[in-house]
Image: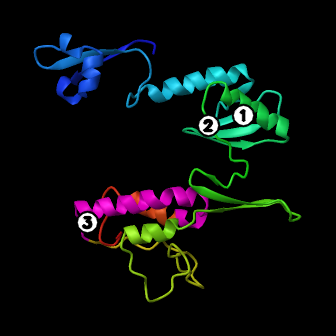
Amino acid sequence: MARPEYIRIKLSDIPDDVIKRYKLREIVDADGYVYCRVEKGMYGLPQAGIIAQELLKDRRGKEGYFQSQTTPGLWTHEDQKTIFTLVVDDFGIKYVNDADAHHLINAIKKHYVRTVDWEAERYCGVAFKWDYKSRIRKVHLTMPNAVQKALLRFNHVKPTKPQYQPYPHQPVIYGAKAQYETQPIESPKLDKAGTKFIQEVTGVFLFMARAINGPLLPALSALASEQASPTEETM
């Protein structure tokens, strides 16, 4: 780190074998605390993420890989056509030939323990089914069982009437010169538990909507705009 941080730990929270190994009873203060000087990244330290990011940036830069100035997490090579995205510790790599792929893998191998999934069937919770045989090559994205798990989590009761769209459309008034927005319905505000429920539903489905199911976004946008102070109508 650019400058050290200091933490204190209650001696009673430290295992006996660690206390004996580092002779912590000799340096514990009158209140029962041990003080530590932190000079490198460690689990739970807020700076750990940026330290790891800067270290990766330095190491990959020496191999010719650079992060986009406008899109964090998107990396390219200065000469090769390799492109990869980085989410926490998962690399999603697009390459043109095996030599380019192995160049990146070997660069990672120098400093990090890694495993390679050449089939690339799952990334960031999204399942990929690649189709290289059809005339128009494509990939199918799914999140298996995600909806079913969410419905169970929220105790969703299956409606008796089928619903064929995730969000009610604005009905068209044929013959009218102007189409007016419907007026908001006055409705009692939800309690704390109801508010939390609306926020959980929005959060659970948002990643799915952004990743693979765009038609969900209008519904989630409407919920998100009201989640700070939702009403029974929101529910």
Residue at which label 1 appears: 105
Residue at which label 2 appears: 73
Q: CA distance from mark 3 to mark 1?
A: 52 Å
Dot 2 or dot 3: first in sequence order is: 2
- Left or right, 9 with respect to 41, comes to left
Residue 161 % position (x, y): 47, 88
- Rendered view: 120 above or below 190: above
Residue at which label 3 appears: 190
Dot 2 or dot 1: first in sequence order is: 2
Residue 148 % position (x, y): 48, 71
What crowding class fits label 1: few (fewer than 14 Cα within 10 Å), some (14-19), or many (20 or more)? some
Residue 226 in view (yes/no): no
What colouring does the structure picture have? rainbow
Instruction: Identify the amino acid type marked 3.
Output: Leu
Secondary structure category for the residue under label 1: helix
Whether tag 2 and tag 1 are in contact, CB under 8 A, the answer is no
